[in-house]
Structures are given as structure tokens and as C-alpha cells.
Image: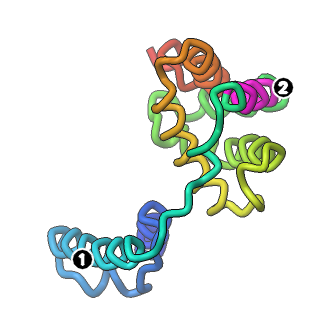
Amino acid sequence: ELVRIKNKLSKELEMELPSTLLLDVPNILNLVQELDHRRCSLTQGRSQTLHTPSPWDKISVQDLVQVIDKCNKKFALPQYQKKLSDMLEKHKPDKAKYLSSIEQILLEVEGSVMLAFDLIEDQASSTIQRSRKQMAVCLKRHAKVKDVRERHDELNHLIKLDADCWS
């Protein structure tokens, strides 16, 4: 269980953590302080290198709409709708468990679309995860654009994250 927690922290924080981390700190407060210290050290190292813009920083609204449309078409396929519905039924009302259970589907669909649009160079999970975070920032930046907002709402509906599925 400790290894699973350490791996999840590593993934979420996008940094390598020692395998004994959870055994080395006596309590949660010390763990938080240790992780903050490690993140600050990592951030300082990153800030000394030049920021390379991601493809999401440069994507046009029209291209963003096309990316979302392609994701929506794939998520609308019967095989994905069946998997998503099954996972929703299995995990409702626990949204966190549902999200965790559909992670591979999201990686599969969004990864292939991102690759097709040259938004990523490979389909490694870490590459897709990083790109998905950049996509979220991009979607937030363009949230006031009607076409983007409507398609993003459709995406959330297709992957069963809209309010209708959780009320």
C-alpha cells in the first residue's frame, strides 16, 4: 500500500521520490514539508532553464475545436460508451473511483488524437498526462469561446462527467 501511495504522489507531482519516503517521515505534516522542499528545489532547477512553449500554447481556436471534435467522435463510439457506462454504473456515486477507472480509456482516446494532431511525440502515459494538463489550461484559456465551450461540454457529457450523470 505504501508503494502505491508513493507512486501516486510521484505521478501527481511529476517527480521521482525515494521508495522509503513514507517510512522516512514520521507524520503527514513532515511529509508535506518534505514534498514542498523537493518541489521548490525542482522548480528552482526548472526556472533556470528556458521555458519551451508546448503545442497547446500555440494552438489556434479552430485547431482546438478540431481536436475536441475528434475526441468527441471517438468517445461517442459504441465500444467506448459501453465501457464508460459500465464504469459509471460500477463506481457511482464515487466520482474519484470513476475517474481512476476510466483513466486508460482517456489515455487511449486522447493520446491517439493528440498524436494525430502532432500535439505529442509519443503515446507514453507520462507524455499524454502532461499534454492533458496542458490541454486543460488551453481549454480554460478559451472557455469563453462558444464553440470551444460547447464542444468541451459535449466531451464531458460523453465521458460521463457532466452534472446529469452525477445528480
What percent of the width, then of the height, locates residue 19? 44, 85
* Most foreground residue, 109 or 116: 116
Q: Is residue 18 above or below residue 120?
A: below
Question: Label 2: which residue?
Answer: 77
At label 2, the amino acid type is: Leu
What percent of the width, then of the height, locates residue 70? 79, 29
Task: Tell me the SS state at disc 1.
Answer: helix
Quadrant of res 46: bottom left
The residue sitting at 72% across, 55% down in the picture is 120
What percent of the width, then of the height, locates residue 123? 76, 58
The residue sitting at 80% across, 24% down in the picture is 73
State left or right for residue 50 relative to residue 90. Answer: left
Prevailing secondary structure of the magenta residues: helix
The numbered mark at residue 58 is none
The reply to whether the magenta stretch includes residue 66 is yes
The residue sitting at 27% across, 87% down in the picture is 24
Q: Quadrant of the C terminus?
A: top left
Q: Quadrant of the N terminus?
A: bottom left
Question: Label 1: which residue?
Answer: 37
Residues in magenta, as a range? 65-75
Q: Is residue 112 above or below residue 40?
A: above
The residue sitting at 45% across, 60% down in the picture is 12
